[in-house]
Amino acid sequence: MATIKFKTNINCANCVAKVTPFLNKKEGITSWSVDIDNPDKILTVETNDLLAEDIVKTVKRTGFEVEPI
């Protein structure tokens, strides 16, 4: 299992709610969380087979900025 971290602009509970259905239905994501208290709004994703680019595409489709760190 791989843990991939991203810097995002997902900065509040409403933003997390907006991205939740997309990340929850993305096959290959075991678990995920966003640390909205961190200044970089860190998204942490646990996956068995996805690449960072797959997750970036999914998050960008929801209207948020995201980059691997």
Image: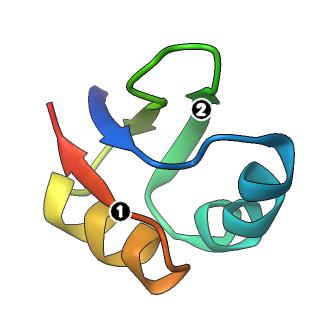
**Where residue 23 sits: x, y (%)?**
60, 62
Residue 65 image label: 1
Q: Residue furthest front?
A: 39
The residue at the point 26 percent across, 57 percent down is 50
Mark 1 falls on what kind of element?
A: loop
* 61 shown above or below 17: below
Asked if 58 appears above or below 14 in the picture, the reply is below
Which callout, 1 or 2, points at the residue further toward the start of the chain?
Answer: 2
Q: Is residue 17 left or right of residue 27?
A: right
Of the 4 image quadrants, the one containing the N terminus is top left
Q: Secondary structure at mark 2?
A: strand
Who is closer to the viewer here, 66 or 21?
66
| Residue closer to the observer: 24 or 16 | 16
Q: Position of residue 28 (x, y in %)?
A: 43, 58
Circle 2 residue = 34
Q: Which amino acid lies under the numbered mark 2 shown in the image of this protein?
A: Val
Q: Residue at x 47, y 49 (%)?
A: 9
Between 9 and 59, the one lying in front of the other is 9
Work out how far the residue at label 1 is from the one at label 2, CA to CA, in angstroms.
13 Å
Color style of the picture? rainbow
The type of residue carrying mark 1 is Glu
- Residue 60 position (above or below residue 19): below
